[in-house]
Image: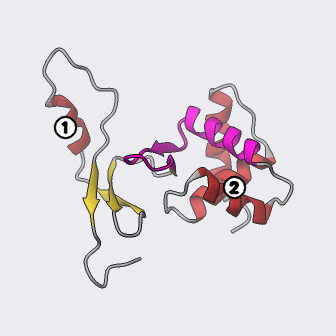
Amino acid sequence: MNQLKQMDRGALSDALGHSGHRTTPQRETVFGVLLDDRDHPTADEVYTRTKSRMPSISMATVYNCLEALVSCGLVKQVNIEREPTRYCPNLSPHAHFHCRETGRVYDVPVPDGMMQNLAKMLSGEYSADSVELVFRGHLAKGQEK
């Protein structure tokens, strides 16, 4: 898909505007790349995919777009062990599954309130702003996506 849906374009414009950024064709294209394949790509993978849609874009511009999308809250950074940062446009509470064989990262739905309940497990001396839950292992045979 080369065009953002009107709803996604509106969300992008609103979020960028609230954080002091403006909407640009480059940011729209990078956001569209993240929404099209929700497979937690690295910046290099986002660059490759964006380059096929916008041949003149540079790696630096992709990094700047990703930074803007993260800072305005439309995209989350996913950091798994010592691997490159990955980007996730799923803003609903969820966990991640990291397949050690393939290196791929998958979203794992969690019950409503689970992430907030995990944060409440901390003693009074700690205050969590967010909770990240990552499962690591291997996909069951026949489940490769």
Viewer-proximal residue among 28 and 101:
101
Colour logic: secondary structure
- Give the secondary structure at mark 1: helix
Circle 1 residue: 118
Question: For residue 82: magenta?
Answer: yes
Quadrant in which the N terminus appears: bottom right
Residue 45 in the image: x percent, y percent?
62, 59
Q: The magenta stretch spans which residues?
A: 59-86
Q: Residue at x 26, y 20 (%)?
A: 127
- Of all residues, the one furthest to the top in this rendering is 125
Above or below, 10 against 98 in this view is above
What residue type is disc 2 on? Answer: Tyr
Please state which amino acid type lies under the numbered disc 1.
Leu
Number of numbered callouts drawn: 2
Q: In this rendered view, identify the residue nearer to me: 25 or 139.
A: 139
Q: Which residue in the rendered view is the most extreme toward the right?
A: 56
Give the labeled residue for mark 2: 47
Q: Earlier in the sequence, mark 2 or mark 1?
A: 2
- As displayed, is residue 41 above or below residue 114? below
> In the image, what residue occupies the spot 28% across and 69% down?
138
Of residues 126 and 99, the one nearer the viewer is 99
133 vs 5, nearest the viewer: 133
Q: Position of residue 67 (x, y in %)?
A: 62, 37
Q: Quadrant of the C terminus?
A: bottom left
